[in-house]
Amino acid sequence: MPLFVSPFAQLDLLRQPEQRHDPLQAFDAADEYLLEHLHQQGLAPGSRVLLLNDGFGALACALAPHATVVSSGDSFLGALALHKNLARNALAADAVQFVPANARAEGPFDVVLIRVPKTLALLEEQLIRLHGQLAPGARVIAAGMVKHLPRAAGELLEQYIGPVQASLAVKKARLLSASPEAKPAPQSPYPTRYRLDSPPLELVNHANVFCREGLDIGTRAFLPHLPLGLGDARVADLGCGNGVLAIVSALDNPHAQYLLLDESFMAVQSAAENWRAALGERPVELRAADGLAGQPADSLDVVLCNPPFHQQQVVGDLLAWRMFKQAHAALRHGGELWIVGNRHLGYHTKLKRLFREVEQVAATPKFVILKARKG
């Protein structure tokens, strides 16, 4: 893989999850542009720098030897990449403080560098949390590849920080520099809530949760077909989002034991709040994680999953296939993976490469619900 070269460092970086012969890089031209611009402006010794959504730690690893760096994002895989890339480049594990996006990074900060996320609600929540956290004369600079940089990102920067100046495009990347000005304390519109009729639930959704305004159509197709009669089974909701699959399943299976996992810290926070609201003090395990990586073999009876088909801006079935393999490893003999997927993704064929039996439980014009049994 090519090295990431900037005025601050030359780095050997990995993406997460790792895959052999990965054609994708752990950095892009927007990272390069941000660091070149910051170097030209100058970075005073002892500056406190906040990085938002630094995908795989490229910015953090470059700046760690030159400033006090705090990195915040909503991806467990991003946090894992940061940790691995610090070690890979002989930087101390504590050279960068990581703050999950469901917590507030405490300022004051002299420089804030932002990689504009795919979900603008996350950007909005992050900008709201910057109120009162900027040092006098602070610089706030956002970056993205032009094709992924909507006009609304600049509008949010102007609304919550101050006037914005857009740079020229360089290697198809652009910077948005915001000049902080005094503004009244903003009121966050997050988390959002929506209601289900059956079962009657109100679900909380923090800013970066998938389909935070309403139940996604895949889950809607899945809910009527969740397995019943699970007894005291050990059940995992893999990629749990706001926790709706596990919660509805738990209401129908009062003695089953549940594990909810997602790589989004905000999703796990949402799932925890929703579980408590629906099920009170019923025991549950929730964690931000790289799926079922590290889960003991033969430790689960059922895995429920509505797998994602993208990571950040990259579309594909890499994450779904990893989830299927992780589920297979974690399930006991005879255990079952239940999924919902778009018909055109061909999950039925993929699952047959891993599981002894694959059965179509139900279908709609757009989705299939599949049950795969481990032999």
Image (cartoon, rainbow, N blue to C red):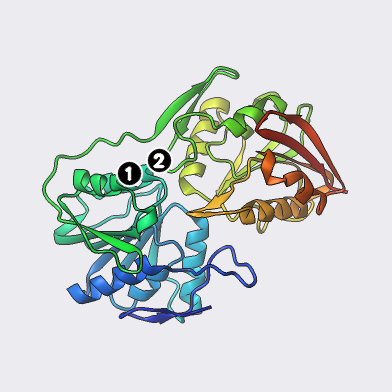
Residue 244 falls left or right of residue 38: right
What residue is rendered at 19% in x and 49% in y? 161
Residue 327 in view (yes/no): yes
Residue hosting label 2: 207
Disc 1 to disc 2, C-alpha distance: 7 Å
Does the residue at mark 1 contact the one at mark 2 (Cβ under 8 Å)? yes
What residue is rendered at 39% in x and 53% in y? 148
Up-down relation of residue 168 to residue 218 (above or below):
below
Front one among 241 and 348? 348
Up-down relation of residue 321 to residue 42 (above or below):
above
Packing grade of label 1 (10 A; few <14, some 14-19, many >=20) is: many
What residue is rendered at 24% in x and 45% in y? 155
**Residue 272 position in % (x across, y down):** 52, 38
**Residue 6 position in % (x across, y down):** 34, 78
Residue 109 in view (yes/no): no
**Residue 266 position in % (x across, y down):** 46, 44
